[in-house]
Image (spheres, rainbow, N blue to C red):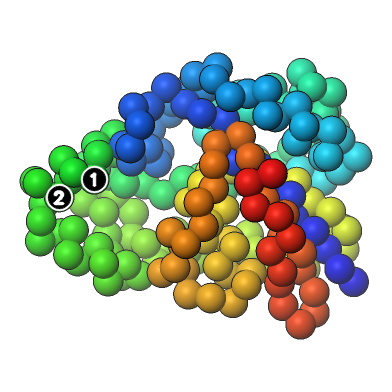
Amino acid sequence: MTMQIFLVRHGPTTAASGVLAGTTELPLSGRGLKRLGDIARKMAPIQHWYASPQLRVRQTLDVLAGYGCSPSRVCHDERLREIDFGRWEMQSFADIAGKYPDLVDDWCNYLDFVFPGGERVRDFIERVEAMADLFRKTEKERIAVVTHGGVIRTMICLVLGISPRNYLLFDVAPASLTILELHHEGGLLKALNL
């Protein structure tokens, strides 16, 4: 059986452009939310919804509902939270590179990197992989997932069978829809940034 995962990235937040915003609770900025109207029309018939419990995702769900997309039940799952950047939260890469040049070099190793005071990358990948495994085992034909850019990028890599180290190859815009298709033989990226 073919199954589709409709992945929605939350809308734009109040964070400054270019900062690492993982576990910091940020509200939506109100910009760019009209795009969610088109997404809501595509997702209205889907009955099985999963979402990150973070504020920006909950607010995105409210916007989708305002456009007539009202799932009867949403399963909020901690495994869909964005990665915890620890002390690097809300800092730009330029600031981080200036303060922690040796750690930035270690970050290039990726899988075993631990953000200072934050999450180990491998742990993040494992929790996203647990969600992908859950979706693979479901009997549903279509699932909606509202979450974060890092989660979506990582899930794309895992479903396509490529190393999560390549997650930056996929630019996932705020308030966009990505569609993955799961087959017995593997996965297919059907759409990116709709």
Label 2 to label 1: alpha-carbon separation: 6 Å
Q: Which of 178 and 164 is in front in this view?
A: 178
Look at mark 2 in the image and give the residue it sits on.
97
Q: Residue 79 carries which label?
A: none
Query: Residue 80's spot in the image, x, y percent?
Result: 56, 48
Query: Residue 177's spot in the image, x, y percent?
Result: 68, 44
Name which quarter of the figure residue 119 lies in.
bottom left
Side of 98 where 55 appears, left or right: right
**Count the marks: how many?**
2
Q: Which of 186 and 77 is in front in this view?
A: 186
Q: Are marks 2 and 1 in contact (CB under 8 Å)?
A: yes
Side of 44 where 151 appears, left or right: left
Name which quarter of the figure residue 38 lies in.
top right
Query: Residue 65's spot in the image, x, y percent?
Result: 77, 23
Residue at horizontal 54 percent and vertical 48 percent from the top: 172
Neighbour class for label 2 at 10 Å: few (<14), some, many (≥20)?
Answer: few
Residue type at the position of mark 2: Ala
Residue at horizontal 43 percent and vertical 59 percent from the top: 168
The answer to whether 96 is drawn above or below residue 183 in the figure is: above
Quarter of the image with the C terminus is top right
The answer to whether 54 is drawn above or below residue 172 in the figure is: above
Residue type at the position of mark 1: Phe
Residue 145 in view: no
Query: Residue 171's spot in the image, x, y percent?
Result: 50, 51
Residue at horizontal 71 percent and vertical 69 percent from the top: 188
Residue at horizontal 55 percent and vertical 67 percent from the top: 157
Residue 11 in view: yes
Look at mark 1 in the image and give the residue it sits on.
93
Q: Under tag 1, what secondary structure?
A: helix
Name which quarter of the figure residue 62 lies in.
top right
Quarter of the image with the N terminus is bottom right
